[in-house]
Image (cartoon, rainbow, N blue to C red):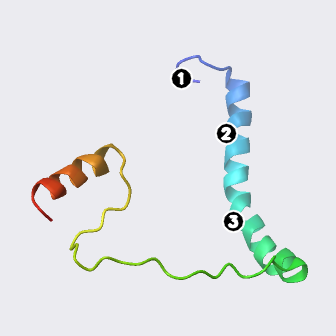
Amino acid sequence: MRYGVVQESVAVIFIAVVASTMAATPLMTLLNERLLLPRAGTRGSMTHPADLVDDRNPVATAGFGSLGGVMGRRIKENGL
């Protein structure tokens, strides 16, 4: 709209679709959990042993994106 990439009439439709799907997603998830899954059941429980945790390392890094990679190198350089 502001930059003229799409026509305003098309942009209004895009915004309406995005807003309605964002509003509908939690409701659909709730309906799935309350109505469909109890009736259909699941294929079985996915039980598996918990991951082993190495207690020797005082730092845990969750994710190695651009910042996580830098932080991981810094931590390793400092012997943590």
For the point 20% across and 50% down, the residue is 73
Left/right placement of residue 19 relative to residue 41 reads: left
Relative height, residue 76 to residue 67 (above, below)? below
Badge 1 amino acid: Arg
Relative height, residue 4 to residue 9 (above, below)? above
First of labels 2, 1 by sequence position: 1
First of labels 3, 1 by sequence position: 1
Query: How many numbered discs, if any?
Result: 3
**Residue 31 lies in what quarter of the image?**
bottom right
- Label 3 sits on residue: 26
Distance from disc 2 to disc 1, alpha carbons, whole Å, reads 14 Å
Q: Quadrant of the C terminus?
A: bottom left
Looking at the rendered image, the disc whose residue lies closer to the viewer, 3 or 2, is 3
Distance from disc 3 to disc 1, alpha carbons, whole Å, reads 31 Å
Picture coordinates of residue 53 (x, y %)?
36, 78
Relative height, residue 17 to residue 26 (above, below)? above
First of labels 3, 2 by sequence position: 2
Picture coordinates of residue 18 (x, y %)?
68, 44
Crowding at mark 3 (Cα within 10 Å: few <14, some 14-19, many 20+): few
Q: Which mark is residue 2?
A: 1
Left/right placement of residue 73 relative to residue 77 reads: right
Crowding at mark 1 (Cα within 10 Å: few <14, some 14-19, many 20+): few
Badge 3 amino acid: Pro
- Asked which secondary structure carries label 1, the reply is loop
